[in-house]
């Protein structure tokens, strides 16, 4: 973080003294104006609902340029990582700042693999939930409960303990997500296997059963691995900011990640791929697409096109192109090109990519559109989509949390407000109240 030669000057029309504020330059991206002394100097706050123009921290983990459609983890473009690295390498990168060499990768993978089992008592937690409980509800509870079992890694000021907690969270999330699924369908839990890769192990825990040996399909495993890489981190979004805010109080890492999962559960954040798939089911068949498109174009209809466009990416979502390739690979591998739902999705994709209405508004299919289709093809139920998202994003959350704890500039989060309620008033006796 370098201080700029230029300064920002804030002047007031009421004749009050102007205030000079330093400007900081990042490696790339917009400069930031340091307003930390604004209140002390002027007695005024800034007003920024949703923090749309406010940098809450400095970070060296993930960079997004929404206008150019760029996403980088530690400087590496997502397009290269998704093709030339697997999820475990991406985890190592996000945690440690650089990609591992062969020795470092083996050591990291071995460590994560040996932590995939959860305490046997965790099974009893699941029994307390109804069978039809939403998996995200189950995950909020069980991830938060991990703090009850691992008292040896809760000292957030000890870098080694933070590292152990990070490994535990990355390792145990797939096991907990798979357990949540198995519990919901009344099947026995499947224990992790140390001879399988991270993604293959998850697929087996999800879809294996004690009656037969689970056959690993490399195409499907690679598809899941890519979903995890593409969702691993996304800068200071709502759930990441939640994890940082919870962490700023000194809360333990398991509690912070549980808070992130709770935030991700919101339909405006983690539920987008679920909404995209539900939209396809509502359209129903290919012949109903023109009528649906007409409704989308009619501002008074209230019908929205889900899975297209993105709040941050104003051009295109760089993850979508990669997810599209994976989507077509999976549908071909499973022979689902003629499945009505997937045929409908591909037809909608074709229309949206060629229709001037969508092209001019840059409403391209985003990563959620394709990842919902891929997960459905893999056999993952819609209710678990956000659980897969949480499993992927845990590495981003824990890397951001770790960075925040080590940042000497971080303080406990305490946003300000513009108070618009009643001015001070006296409490009348009960008999005088109307």
Image: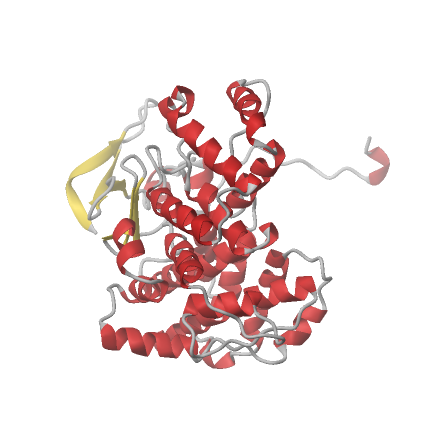
What residue is drawn where x is 44% and y is 79%? 194
Q: Nearer the viewer, residue 113 or 345?
A: 345
Q: Is residue 246 left or right of residue 73?
A: right
How many numbered discs sit on the rendered protein?
A: 0
Q: Position of residue 45 (x, y in %)?
A: 41, 38
- In the displayed orientation, state which residue is furthest to the left: 5
Q: Nearer the viewer, residue 374 or 412?
A: 374
- The vertical placement of 111 against 355, above or below, is below
Quick check: can you spot residue 433? yes
Q: Nearer the viewer, residue 95 or 174?
A: 174
- The vertical placement of 358 against 136, above or below, is above
For residue 420, what is the image quadrant?
A: top right
- The vertical placement of 66 against 410, above or below, is above
Coloring applied to the structure: secondary structure
For residue 10, what is the image quadrant?
A: top left
Quarter containing the C terminus: top right
Quick check: can you spot residue 252? no
Q: Position of residue 83 (x, y in %)?
A: 29, 55
What residue is drawn where x is 54% and y is 73%? 147
What residue is drawn where x is 38% and y is 20%? 356
Q: Is residue 22 left or right of residue 111?
A: left
Q: Position of residue 278 (x, y in %)?
A: 59, 40
Q: Nearer the viewer, residue 184 or 36?
A: 184
What residue is drawn where x is 63% and y is 75%? 211
Q: Position of residue 171 (x, y in %)?
A: 45, 71
């Amino acid at each position: 973080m370098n201080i700029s030669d230029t300064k920002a000057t804030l002047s007031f029309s009421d004749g009050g003294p102007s205030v000079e504020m330093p400007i900081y330059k990042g490696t790339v991206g917009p400069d930031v104006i340091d307003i930390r002394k604004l209140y002390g100097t002027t007695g005024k706050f800034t007003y920024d609902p949703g923090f749309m123009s406010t940098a809450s921290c400095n970070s060296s983990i993930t960079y997004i340029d929404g206008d150019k459609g760029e996403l980088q983890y530690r400087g590496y473009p997502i397009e290269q990582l998704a093709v030339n690295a697997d999820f475990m390498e991406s985890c190592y990168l996000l945690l440690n700042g650089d990609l591992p060499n062969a020795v470092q990768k083996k050591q990291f993978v071995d460590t994560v693999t040996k932590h995939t089992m959860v305490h046997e008592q965790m099974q009893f937690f699941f029994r307390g939930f109804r069978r039809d409980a939403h998996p995200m509800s189950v995950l909020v509870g069980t991830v938060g409960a991990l703090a009850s079992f691992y008292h040896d890694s809760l000292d957030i000021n000890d870098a080694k303990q933070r590292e152990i907690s990070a490994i535990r969270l990355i390792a145990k999330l797939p096991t907990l997500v798979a357990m949540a699924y198995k519990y919901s369908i009344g099947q026995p839990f499947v224990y992790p296997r140390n001879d399988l890769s991270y993604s293959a192990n998850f697929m087996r825990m999800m879809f294996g059963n004690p009656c037969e040996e689970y056959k690993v399909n490399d195409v499907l495993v690679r598809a899941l691995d890519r979903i995890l890489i593409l969702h691993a981190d996304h800068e200071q979004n709502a759930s990441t900011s939640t994890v940082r805010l919870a962490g700023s109080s000194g809360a333990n890492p398991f509690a912070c990640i549980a808070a992130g999962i709770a935030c991700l559960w919101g339909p405006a954040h983690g539920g987008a791929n679920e909404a995209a798939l539900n939209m396809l089911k509502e359209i129903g068949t290919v012949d109903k697409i023109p009528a649906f498109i007409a409704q989308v174009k009619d501002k008074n209809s209230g019908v929205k096109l889900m899975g297209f466009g993105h709040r941050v990416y104003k051009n295109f979502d760089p993850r979508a192109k990669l997810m599209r390739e994976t989507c077509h690979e999976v549908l071909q591998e499973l022979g689902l090109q003629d499945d009505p739902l997937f045929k409908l999705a591909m037809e909608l994709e074709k229309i949206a990519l060629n229709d001037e209405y969508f092209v001019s508004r840059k409403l391209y299919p985003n990563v959620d559109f394709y990842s919902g289709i891929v997960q459905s093809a893999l056999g993952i139920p819609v209710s678990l989509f956000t659980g897969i998202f949480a499993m992927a994003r845990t590495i981003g959350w824990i890397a951001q949390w770790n960075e925040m704890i080590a940042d000497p500039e971080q303080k406990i989060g305490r946003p300000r407000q513009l108070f618009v309620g009643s001015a001070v008033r006296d409490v009348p006796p009960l008999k005088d109240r109307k």
